[in-house]
Amino acid sequence: MEKGTVWVIGASSGLGLATAEAFAADGWQVISGARSFGVHSEKDAVHTSIHPIGLDVTVAESREAFAQSAFAISPRVDALVYCAAVLMLGPCEETSPDEYAQVMQTNFVGLTAMVSLVLPAMRSRQQGKIILFSSINGLLGIPFQSAYTASKHAVEGYAECLAMEVKPHGIQVCLVEPGDHRGGSQHTRLRTHRGEEASPYEPACGIATGIIHRDESNGLSPIRLGAKVVQNANRKRMRIRLRVAKPDQRLAVVLHDLLTPSLNFWILRDYYGKGGRA
C-alpha cells in the first residue's frame, strides 16, 4: 500500500532529488516537478513510484499544467514539499532589482503559488502536510548572499502565518532549515551581473564566496536530510521546524538570538572575512 501522494517541487538535483527518492523508498507515490523535466518524462525517474513532470514555478501556466497533470495521476495530495530554490551571490549594492526579483520568484513567490494550488484539495479532506524548505539563512544573514537570505526570511514568516491559518482545516506545516549540504546543482548558483568597473567589494566577496563554496562542499549528506524529512512527514504531528545542520551552524543560530547584535555581527563578519577562522 502506498502511504499517500506527495508533490516534491524542485526535485531534479540536490536536496530536492534526495527528498523525492526518500519518499519513494518509503512507499509514497511521488509526483516531482522541475524545470529540467519534460512534460511527462518517466525516463527521468529513478523509482517507478516517481512521476517527473516539467514545471517552471515562476510561470503561472506551467504551475497550473503541473497541477492538472498531477491530479490526473492521483486525485489526492497528502503532502507538498517545496525545495525549489536558486542562490544568488554578490554584494547588496551590485544586486539589481531584477536579480532580487528573480530569486524571490523562485524561492518565495513560486512557493506561495504552489501552496495555494494544493490547499483546496487538502481542505476538502481536512488533512494534509505542507513542508517548506527554508534554510539556516532564513534565521540569520551572511555577507554577499542577501537575495537568498531575504527570500528564506520571507519563507519563515509566511510559513508561520500559514500554519496558524490552516490548522483548523487539519493541515500541518513544517519548515525545513538545512545547513550546508553537498550536491547542490551549479546551475542554481548564480552570480550578480558585474559592470565594467572594478568592484570595491571584490576582495571581500571573493573570500566570502570561497568560504560558502568550501562549506557546501564539506556539508552534510542530502540522503540523510531526505530521510529526516520523510521521518517527520510520517509523524502524526509533524515538528513545525526541522533543523538539519552541523553543530557549529546550529550554535550560530542560538548565538544569533542570545548575543548582542554588534557581537553577533562581528563573529559572522570575521568568519566570512578571514577564511573561516572565527
Image (cartoon, rainbow, N blue to C red):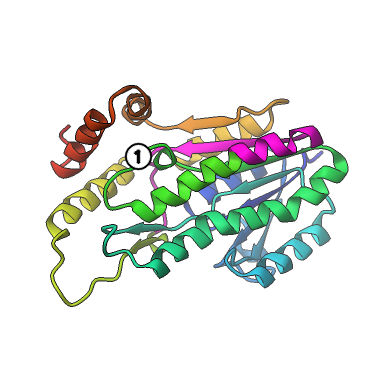
Image coordinates of residue 255 in percent, x first then y, are 32, 25
Residue 40 vertical placement versus 18 (above, below): below
Specify the segment rendered in magenta.
160-185
Q: Nearer the viewer, residue 23 or 87?
A: 87
Image coordinates of residue 163 in percent, x first then y, are 66, 36
Residue 135 vertical placement versus 245 (above, below): below
Q: Nearer the viewer, residue 277 or 5?
A: 277
Q: Nearer the viewer, residue 48 or 71?
A: 71
Residue annotated with mark 1: 219
Question: Which residue sits at x=29%, y=71%?
Answer: 193
Position of 35 with respect to 6 (left or right) is left
Question: Which residue sits at x=45%, y=60%?
Answer: 103
Count of labels in the image: 1
Q: Amino acid at mark 1?
A: Gly
Q: Is residue 189 visible?
A: yes
Position of 154 with respect to 75 (left or right) is left
| Residue 170 among magenta residues | yes
Label 1 sits on a secondary structure element that is loop
Image coordinates of residue 248 in percent, x first then y, are 31, 28
Quadrant for residue 61, please give it.
Answer: bottom right
Q: Quadrant of the N terminus?
A: top right
